[in-house]
Amino acid sequence: MLTTIHNASELTEIILDYRKKGLKIGFVPTMGALHKGHLHLVKMSKNENDITIVSIFVNPTQFNDPRDLEKYPRTLSKDQELLQSTASADILYAPDVDDIYPDGIQSGSDIGLGGLDVMMEGSHRPGHFNGVAQVVNRLLEIVKPDNLYMGQKDFQQFTIINYMLKSLSIPTKLRVCPIVREDNGLAMSSRNVRLSPEVRTNASIIFKTLKAVKQKSRILDIESLKQYAIKRLDKPPFKPEYFDIVDGNTLLPVDNLDNHGYIVACTAVWVEGVRLIDNMVLKSDL
């Protein structure tokens, strides 16, 4: 039975009781508008923990565009039904802004991110990852989970959060789940609901391009791969913002596939006022 909690102090009391019983806690932070990708995270947590807590909080500090914050879908009732009937989460934590930031939204916003926040997504969304780190750190202070579940779709985000966990000596372990895709290959996202049916179907071009780049990585150099991808994605109504090939650990651009053991292609594409991100591992010696 799903229990919905809106207050941090109430949740803290419940978590203390779980800890006294020696229960392991898994945590899935979300901004709501849940889809199968989120539910996969919840199910993974259920399999690996005694208790699974999901948060739904549309965090204002990670939106560098106020219009994007305003348009972000909010479907709490539907999300509650999904968590109870499909994923069987134990607790839904749905706070308001004052509960997360009792000292104001600037509190805790100066977390050092080792420069991982200024490239790729960060160069196009200044301050975004500071907001992400700020809210995740605050949520971890409240929930204190054993395991934290995030999706591979937000590659730069989970890389930054993993850095934060280590730099702040937070004992929570990060568990990353593979990208969950729609039937046409489009990475599942809460923003997909804003796409017209035709564009949502044609957005398969992003996944197809990533697959083609992986295949061609055996024969083309890095710059040629990037040029090929941009040309393929730059077809109206789609407009690529970037296509980068980076070291999966440092997020720095790579110039030779042979010199790195972990390489990821990452992209962001605009269509119908919606920004779609995706990525694919090109090489991994892990």
Image: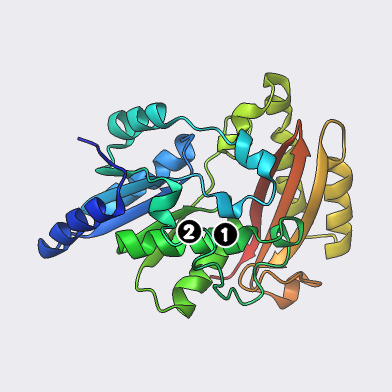
For the residue marked with disc 1, what is the amino acid?
A: Gly
Residue 135 marker: 2
Q: Is 280 drawn above or below residue 233 in the view shown? A: below
Picture coordinates of residue 142 (x, y %)?
32, 60
Q: How far apart are marks 2 and 1 (CA)?
A: 6 Å
Instruction: Give the residue type at disc 2.
Output: Val
Question: In this orientation, which residue lies closer to the viewer: 175 or 171?
Answer: 171
* Number of the label disc, if any, that sits on residue 190: none
Is 43 on the left-hand or right-hand side of 260? left
183 sits to left or right of 240: left
Mark 1, other Cα within 10 Å: few <14 / some 14–19 / many ≥20: many
- For the rendered model, the colour scheme is rainbow
Q: Tell me whether the residue at label 2 lies in contact with that at label 1, contact meaning CB atoms closer than 8 angstroms.
A: yes
Q: Position of residue 37 (x, y in %)?
A: 48, 40
Residue 131's label in the rendered image is 1
Compared to residue 136, the image places residue 89 above or below, namely above
Spot the residue most to the top.
197
Question: Above or below — where is 149 with respect to 276?
Answer: below
User: Image point 64% across, 28% down: which residue?
Assistant: 194
Quadrant of the snapshot with the N terminus: top left
Q: Can residue 5 be seen in this view?
A: yes
